[in-house]
Amino acid sequence: MSKERFERAALFWGAMICFAPSDEGGSGGGAGADGGGEDTAPGAGGADTIPAAGGNDGAGDGAKWWEGNAFSDEHRTNLTALGLTVDDPLQAIPKLLDMEQSAKKRLGASPDQLITKPKDGQSVADWLKEHGDTFGIPKDAESYEVARPESWPKDRAWDEAFESEARKIAHEEGVPASALNKFVEIFAGKMAKMEGESAEQLEASNTQMMADLSKDWGQQMPAKLAMAKQAMSAIAEKAGFDESNILSVASVLTEKAGGDANAIRLFATIGEMMGEDSLVVTPGGAGLGQTPAEARAELQRLRSPGGDYYEAAATGDTAKLKELQPRIEALTKLAT
């Protein structure tokens, strides 16, 4: 065998060794040191048994090893660009190995562990979901596990519909579960802070308004409050409110419970406009502007000896008792 053919054969078999899959258990078909197989290296003084790489390569005498038919034009272009067109093909193998090691170092991982960029026309969201296992994106919106932040008040309702919408958007846009929980935590904290500040501002404003009412009404404050409650009760009953609803509305007129000063002023004004004759909670109702203490005192008089209700009950005057009953009920409501 000529030197040129030997060098091409060595390059061929060297490449086969370098790029063949690793076999830790040893090669099953090749001859080992004691395998007894035919030598594939040139024997001492005997005929070489290494075949020419690819048979007739088409390279004439004096042609370079990469110029034969064993390589395409693209191969030759790449070999030239990589600086592998050296005279001795065996010198190209170390360079090729160095390039492979350098590429792996620059990549930082083996090729099978790398993620390709989005395909032409593929949205970033779809690309992220395609690699959902890597980026922590659930398979569907319902699979997101949203943790309610500790900053959210325990006595405040959680908006389930809003959370469901957030899950849907997160999955559509390829948002990782950890990122969604961060967004939820920030949003919930902001909402809790805003509501807390709003409640504080409302309380401070109402305290100031109650102080202004007390300043404006002076000693008439209790009577004005009683008038506001009676006006509210009359309108609520006219609207068909039951007792529980009336009590709910009445809570905004209770000064000690942080009543709403604007509501108190409004109903007190309504009471003044309606007047004694038109503001009747029930037939024979309590007098306009009467305080709870005054209502209790009147009840005591009616039920004591000499009082109308006491005397009617003592004599069995059912007609009188029926006439007084609405007033007794109205005074009892005001007293309580």
Image (spheres, rainbow, N blue to C red):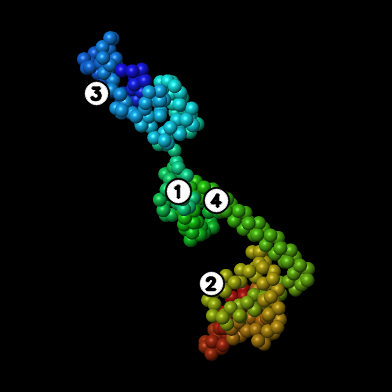
Is tag 3's residue or tag 4's residue first in the polypeptide sequence? 3
Residue 335 lies left or right of residue 17; in this view the side is: right
> Would you place residue 193 above or below residue 332 in this image?
above
Residue labelled with disc 3: 28
Image marks 3 and 4: residues in contact by CB distance under 8 Å = no
Residue 293 visible, this angle: no
304 or 319, nearer to the observer: 319
Which is in the foreground here, disc 2 or disc 4? 4
Secondary element at tag 2:
helix
Displayed quadrant of residue 33? top left
- Where, quadrant-wise, is the C terminus in this rendering? bottom right
**Badge 3 amino acid:** Gly
Residue with the most extreme left position: 36
Label 4 vs label 1: CA separation?
Answer: 29 Å
SS for dot 4: helix
**Where is 77 relative to 170, above or below?**
above
Q: Residue at x 40, y 20 (%)?
A: 90
Residue 88 lies, with reference to residue 197, above or below; the image says above
Residue corresponding to mark 1: 119
Mark 4: give few (<14), some (14-19) or many (20+) Cα within 10 Å: few
Direction top: furthest residue: 45
Quick one: label 2 or label 3, which is nearer the N terminus? 3
Q: Amino acid at mark 1?
A: Lys
Which residue was labeled with disc 2? 244
* Residue closest to the eye, 112 or 1: 1
**Mark 3 vs mark 4, CA separation in Å:** 59 Å
